[in-house]
Amino acid sequence: METAVVTGGAGFLGSHLCDKLLNEGLKVICIDNLITGNVNNIAHLAGNENFKFIKHDVTNYIFIPGKVNYILHFASPASPVDYLQLPIQTLKVGSLGSHKALGLAKEKKARFLLASTSEVYGDPDIHPQREDYWGNVNPIGPRGVYDEAKRFAEALTMAYQRYHNVETRIARIFNTFGTRMRVQDGRAIPNFIMQALQNEPITVYGDGSQTRSFCYITDQVDGLFKLLMSDENEPVNIGNPEEISVLEIAKEIIMLTKSKSKIVFEELPVNDPKVRQPDITKAINKLGWKPIVKREEGLKDTIEYFKNLILK
Ligand code: UDP
């Protein structure tokens, strides 16, 4: 059996990835310091002989005995609210953490997959975003801690590929949603669902005309797995190209939850990208992947998940 290490494996994306890798017949070693991850996300894997959890901060040296075939580096705060509250940790895990994870990949002769982000494109001048666009990032703005850490991580990944011959993959992950997002996550979809289920005001930032394109978690992990197993060693966008304004998604969630919530408009965060939509031509052509879950379907599942959390 092959073995995969997932850093950030107790987080939203990481834990779904652990499930996917186990389902594909791999052994999984999950590493997480539980700053934004939660053991509840992997509790169902306790007792699974192919799964192991190590509580560790990957900005420090990572020691794993035995053979490792794949390293998937997913450790990082990922919600704008989180990385604004944890700016230094975000910079450290993107830089020092990526260095340690790549060092492990080199040592083990393992294939490395970096969880990068659409944030490398910043507030984009090109729409939709293609992988050959270099981005428009404010390095010293509040989002710079995440954006620049991920840009550095991409540069480091390419350097390990070119100079140490480590086999690497880079996923530029666009907005993704689904079960296991935290109640306090702070991102638009969990916020809106929690607010709607409790008939509280829905907080739309700015006038809500900014756009995002939301991918359901099952599609996202399928895309990530296909990228891992492909031979594409330059960045690939993984996301759902169906674009919607933030105001529209708020209305959609009110409708699906049959909520009495009213929309309130709050201040737009600094450097909040005005538009975002992945061009997924490369993923379609190179990975044979594209998302298949309709947003409404994904939202219904996510709403059920949050409903059950409230009842607990
Ligand atoms: N947003 C909002 N209300 C919220 C949370 C987020 O209007 O309660 C907006 C946010 O300003 C951004 C979009 O929704 O324009 C998506 O934000 P999110 O935090 O989900 O992630 P981002 O795409 O900015 O990384």
Image (cartoon, rainbow, N blue to C red):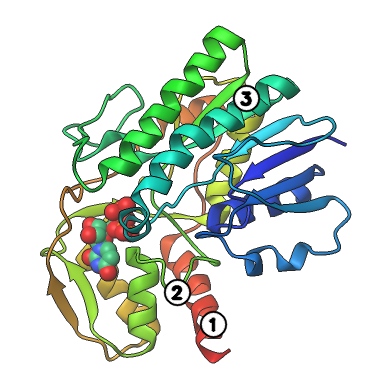
**C-alpha gap between disc 1 and disc 3:** 39 Å
Where's residue 181, x and y in %?
49, 65
* Numbered badge on residue 309: 1
What residue is rendered at 80% in x and 42% in y?
26
Say which residue label 2 marks.
Answer: 183
Residue 85, how many percent across, how many down?
33, 58
Which of pointers 1 and 3 lies earlier in the amino acid sequence?
3
Q: How many marks?
A: 3
Task: Tell which circle, 2 or 3, labels the residue nearer the N-terminal end.
Answer: 3
**Which of pointers 1 and 2 lies earlier in the amino acid sequence?**
2
Q: Amino acid at mark 1?
A: Leu
Examine the image and state in which quarter residue 253 appears: bottom left
Foreground of the two, 69 or 104 = 104
- Identify the residue at image location x=54%, y=76%: 305
Q: Is residue 128 left or right of residue 118?
A: left
Circles 1 and 2, Cβ within 8 Å, touching? The answer is yes
- Find residue 92 and name its label: none
Is residue 20 toward the left or the right of residue 242 in the image?
Answer: right
Q: Quadrant of residue 147?
A: top left
Instruction: Decide: is 169 above or below 239.
Output: above
Q: Secondary structure at mark 3?
A: helix
Q: Which residue is mark 3?
A: 103
What is the residue that sits farthest to the top in this orientation? 163
Residue closer to the observer: 224 or 140? 140
Give the residue drawn at x 62%, y 52%: 32
